[in-house]
């Protein structure tokens, strides 16, 4: 609960903080010697994305995540994401928005978002 002089935490700040915590939790599961972290590598229609680092940051009012990905095809391998996504499309998902079903998976949603912006390894052929 916010103190009298404090503003309540924004939803984008909460989502960014949650993403940072999820990444840290999954990274701890990685075994020494693993070449690729399968829990942090996502195949998307735009290519494969391996999340190397997801770090939560805030300036007191706004929260965001700084993301480092492996081997982008073009551009900078790091991203600054404010108000990160939480959902990925999934026909069996339990969240319904309009005519589409989604599941909550913030790390996968982040990977899909980065891949759509050209930050993937082109590992999938169409």
Image (spheres, rainbow, N blue to C red):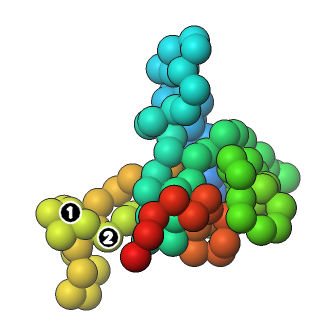
How packed mark 1 is, by other alpha carbons closer than 10 Å (few <14, some 14-19, many 20 or more), is some
Q: Which image quarter is the N terminus in?
A: top right
- Dot label at residue 93: 1
Looking at the image, which is closer to me, 77 or 71?
A: 71
Q: Which mark is residue 31?
A: none
Residue 86 visible here: no
Residue picked out by circle 2? 89
Q: Residue at x 58, y 14 (%)?
A: 33
Residue farthest bottom in this picture: 98
The number of discs equals 2
On screen, residue 36 above or below 40: above
Q: Quadrant of residue 81?
A: bottom right
Tell me the distance, in whole angstroms, between the alpha carbons under discs 2 and 1. 7 Å
The residue positioned 45% from the left and 64% from the top of the image is: 124
Residue 103 image point, x, y percent = 29, 60
- Judged left or right of residue 11, residue 58 is right
Is the C-beta separation of discs 2 and 1 under 8 Å?
yes
Along the line of sight, which residue is nearer the eye, 67 or 13? 67
Q: Residues within 10 Å of mark 2 (few under 14, many from 20)?
A: some
Most distant residue in the top direction? 32
Circle 2 sits in a helix, a strand or a loop, which is it?
A: strand
The reply, left or right, for residue 1 in relation to residue 97 is right
């Amino acid at each position: 609960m916010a103190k009298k002089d404090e503003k309540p935490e924004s939803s984008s700040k909460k989502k960014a903080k949650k993403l940072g915590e999820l990444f840290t939790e999954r990274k701890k599961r990685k075994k020494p010697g693993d070449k690729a972290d399968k829990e942090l590598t996502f195949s998307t229609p735009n290519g494969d994305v391996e999340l190397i680092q997801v770090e939560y940051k805030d300036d007191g009012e706004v929260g965001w995540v700084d993301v480092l990905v492996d081997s982008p095809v073009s551009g900078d391998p790091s991203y600054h994401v404010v108000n990160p996504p939480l959902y990925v499309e999934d026909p069996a998902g339990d969240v319904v928005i309009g005519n589409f079903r989604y599941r909550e998976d913030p790390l996968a949603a982040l990977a899909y978002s980065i891949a759509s912006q050209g930050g993937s390894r082109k590992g999938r052929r169409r």
